[in-house]
Image (spheres, rainbow, N blue to C red):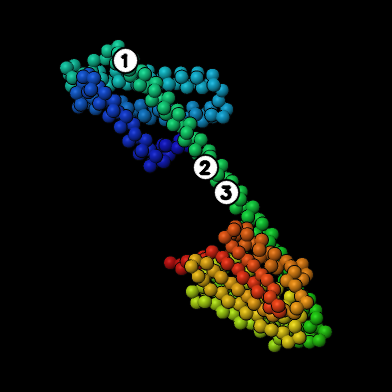
Amino acid sequence: MHPVLSDFRRLLWYVVTWLLTGILFARFLVTAGMSDWSYSLLLTLPVIFVFSFFATSAYYICRAFPVNQRPFYIAIVIFGSSALISGAILLGLCQGWNQVLALFTGSTYALQMTEYLNVLLLILGFTLYLLSLLAYDVLIAFNTMREAERRATNSKLAARDAELQVLRSQIDPHFLFNSLNSISALTVVDPSAAREMTIALADFFRKTLTLAEQEKVTLRVELELCEHFLAVEKIRFGNKLQTDIQLAANAADALVPGMLLQPLFENAIKHGIRHLRSGGTIAMQILQHHGWLHIRTENPCASNTTPTTGNGLGLLNIRERLATLYGDQARIHWEKKEQQFILEIALPLELKQDEI
């Protein structure tokens, strides 16, 4: 489809540009003393208008002979001959329209088609068509570059989505494996608790299935999911596991990647609470400040454990997901201070838009 004729805005600018060309041509005729303004405009504007649509054929020539596949001699022959034919067409249009006008206005006002003027019209048509060829070459090159950028962007997005899907798919099996181990341990010492934990685990996975298609969820929804997870773990650890979650009111509708917080609680339990005879409290504080969302967790841990005990999948998975989604805009840092493990995350603030 023609890029000018198929786009109303481009077509409007195209016609205006050619009509301005017709006005400049009329001014030349007036300045050269060949005609007055009224007759010059009456002659040039209709001719240029008709010629402008003939010049759209330059697009198809440029498409048929792309710049990167166009031998120099082909360009000279094809472009030169088409421009010469266009010059002859512009000359014929001017002569024919001038005769038509002469019938209605009288020969007194008609333009005298001298040999000089005929050559000038031929050169003008030749030049205008060459400029059209050049303009379409530039337009095609621009469209090709923009299409290549679009394809590259789509490829990056597809690769990012695939990477996120792989990372996301690692979370559920990892959590399920740990939960089944917990249920297995409870079946020996407390079968009723094991049954209760199995039901709580089913509720958790039912909730995750409803959110599986969402790349990002609000913190309110994410924390509701974490409550299901903590319900499972509290059955196992009882009063040893305490939580203190502080969510700022203005951060409740902030968007975060799904299953972002659950691995934080899981890590705190696996590498902290589980190793302490008296257990402890997992403290989480979430707030927004100056366009950033800050998440901080803190939990007690034994002095002889490290954050990388086991395979460390949870925190490493979070780091990779954040890098994929936010690039270098997101930050995650964790450290152990004496018998306290501290983790901090900073994300660009995104708020859920209210539906209208």
- Secondary structure under tag 2 reads helix
Nearer the observer, 327 or 90: 327
Which mark, by number, is residue 327?
none
- Residue at the spot of label 1: 118
Residue beneath the point at 68% across and 61% down: 167
Nearer the observer, 73 or 281: 281
CA gap between label 3 and label 1 equals: 52 Å
Label 3 crowd bin: few (<14), some (14–19), many (20+), radius 10 Å: few
Query: Amino acid type of disc 1?
Result: Asn
- Secondary structure under tag 3 reads helix
Q: Is residue 115 left or right of residue 221?
A: left
User: Which comes sooner in the sequence, label 3 or label 1?
Assistant: 1
The answer to whether residue 68 shows anywhere in this view is yes
Q: Is residue 304 left or right of residue 168?
A: right
Above or below for 140 versus 247: above
Report the residue that reaches farthest toward the right. Answer: 188
Query: Amino acid type of disc 3?
Result: Thr
User: Which comes sooner in the sequence, label 2 or label 1?
Assistant: 1
Above or below for 41 versus 111: below
Which mark, by number, is residue 146?
2
- Residue at the spot of label 3: 153
CA gap between label 2 and label 3 equals: 10 Å
Label 1 crowd bin: few (<14), some (14–19), many (20+), radius 10 Å: some
